[in-house]
Image (tube, rainbow, N blue to C red):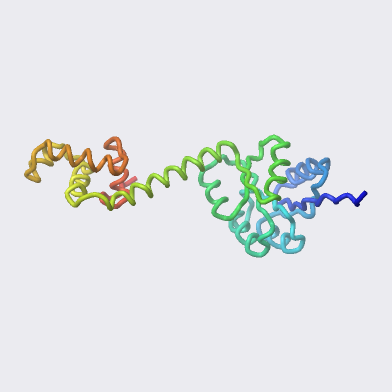
Amino acid sequence: MGASVQQSVIRVLIADDHPLFRQGIQALFFLESGIEIVGEAVDGNDAIAKVKLHRPDVALIDAAMPGISSFEAARAIRRCNPETRVLFLSLYDDDDCLRLAMEAGASGYLLKNSPPAQIVAAVRQVSRGMSELTPDGVSRLVDDLQALARVNLRSARSTLLTRREQEILKLFAEGGTARKIAADLQLSIKTVEAHKFNLMRKLDIHNRAELIDFAVQQRILPAPVP
């Protein structure tokens, strides 16, 4: 019989400014085979230094530590040791935090009240190069990507509009009625409605609200003042 292949150990760094939370994570992983805590850090700068020293497989980072931003720390970690995967643990189920984490190169984002088994599974997942997000985070990320794809598709399709359709799009987005636009452009109402139908079909737009959103995105209309 050949020698059995030894399972590699996942080396984890914990970065959190609360000692009790670090101790809780230590206790959680103490009972898990194949996971070893190689160091602790109390803030972003400390996390960067400890990653350079220990070169962990996974850096488990609090999203709101004092001092340097946790997201800046994640960027620095990814630069100094790209093999280290960053997994954020956060108190905040927040779109902006999730976006900042993904932009910083994180492999995952979980809430601190996630079930312990989910946190352990996430560490194993990201150590293998996979991603792990909260279920709500995944849903919102997919929604954002789909919305971005629709905007990009409409932007591409806008080049297919005739000059007259572009003119009528602007006038409708500004709140004009078919009757007023027809009078201003010296066209029949039927012709204006036909142009409106064609431009909305080309852009896959179904109502005036979407038309206004598109006009703002394309800078046909100025953005509303908050």
Image coords of residue 23 (percent x, y) = 78, 44
Image coords of residue 74 (percent x, y) = 62, 56
Residue 186 horizontal side relative to residue 41, left or right: left
The single residue placed furthest to the right in the displayed view is 1
Does 189 appear above or below 66?
above
* Front position in the image: 107 or 146: 146
For image coordinates 79% across by 47% down, the residue present is: 35
For image coordinates 23% across by 41% down, the residue present is: 198
Q: Quadrant of the C terminus?
A: top left
Residue 99 horizontal side relative to residue 73, left or right: left
The single residue placed furthest to the front in the displayed view is 1
Residue 46 horizontal side relative to residue 180, left or right: right
For image coordinates 31% across by 45% down, the residue present is: 214
* Front position in the image: 70 or 152: 152
In the figure, residue 125 lies in which quadrant?
A: top right
Image coords of residue 47 (percent x, y) = 69, 57
Q: How many marks?
A: 0
* Front position in the image: 24 or 208: 208
For image coordinates 64% across by 51% down, the residue present is: 65
